[in-house]
Image (spheres, helix red, strand yellow):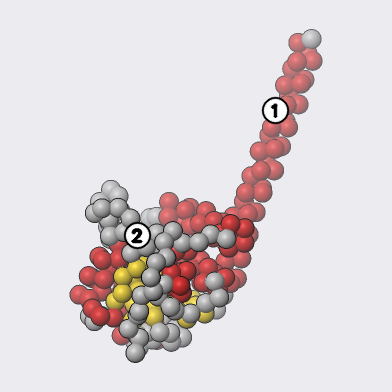
Amino acid sequence: MKWLEKQMMKALLKLVGLGIGVLSVVVLAAIFGCEWWIARAAKGRCFDEAEVVPEAPVAVVLGASPRLADGRANLFFLPRLESAVALFKAGRVKALIVSGDNGTRGYDEPTEMKRLLVQMGVPEARVICDFAGFRTLDSVVRAREVFGQSRVVFVSQRFHNERAIYLARAAGMEAHGLNAQDVSVAIAPKTYLREKLACVKAVLDVTVLKTRPKFLGEKIAVPVD
C-alpha cells in the first residue's frame, strides 16, 4: 500500500509540474505576443527627433509624477517634458495636452507638468490639463472624445508611446510618437515589468473587454488656431 501511495504521489507531482510548465509557456506566449502586436501597430510611427515627427494639431504628454513614492526623482518625468518642449518649439504641434492622474488630494500630475512646461518656455494658453488621465487608455480616448482630436502625437518613452499608438489606432485615431530619453532596465526594472503586463491589459481592453475611460464629461476646446 505504501508503495502504491508513493507511486500515486509521484504521478501527481509530475502532473502538477507539467501543468505549471504548460501554464508558464502560455503566460509567456501571451506577454510576448501582446508586446509584438503592439509594436507592430506602432511600427514606423515613433521618432527620436522632434523635427521629423509628422505635424499634428496637438501632442498628448502622457502623465508621470516628478517623484516616486519613496521621494526619489522619477527619471522618466523630465525627459518627457523636454521632448514636449522640443516638439512645440519645432512647430510640429500647436498645443500640448498634459494628461495624468489627479485622483487623490495632494497628487496632481497635470498641474505639475503644466507648471514646468510654462517655465521651459511654452505659452501657458497652449498647455491644456487633462485631469482624468488615470490610465493610458483614458488619456487616449479622452483626447478624441473630450478634446476633439483625431490626429495626435504622443510624448513619452518609446515603450509607452507604442502602447498609446496601439490604443489610439484602435480608437480610429491617426497617431505618432516622440520618444523621450529612456531609462535603463537596470535602473527601473519594476517599470518595465509593469509595462509587459500593461501590454497584455491593453490588448484585452481593445479586443475583449472593450474598456472605456473612467470619466469623460463635457467637451474641452484646445487652442490650435
Image quadrant assignment for residue 113: bottom left
- Looking at the picture, how far across and down is residue 219, in whole percent? 39, 74
- At label 1, which amino acid type do we have? Leu
Identified at 34% across, 59% down, the residue is 101
Considering depth in this image, is 145 or 127 the residue closer to the camera? Answer: 145
Q: Is residue 126 left or right of residue 138?
A: left
- Location of mark 2 (residue): 101
What SS does tag 2 mark?
A: loop
Considering depth in this image, is 79 or 62 the residue closer to the camera? Answer: 62
Identified at 20% across, 75% down, the residue is 119
What SS does tag 1 mark?
A: helix
193, above or below 77, in the image: above
Q: State the quadrant of the N terminus.
A: top right
Q: Is residue 59 left or right of residue 45?
A: left
Q: State the quadrant of the C terminus.
A: bottom left
- Looking at the picture, how far across and down is residue 128, in whole percent? 31, 74
Q: Is residue 40 left or right of residue 137?
A: right
- Location of mark 1 (residue): 13
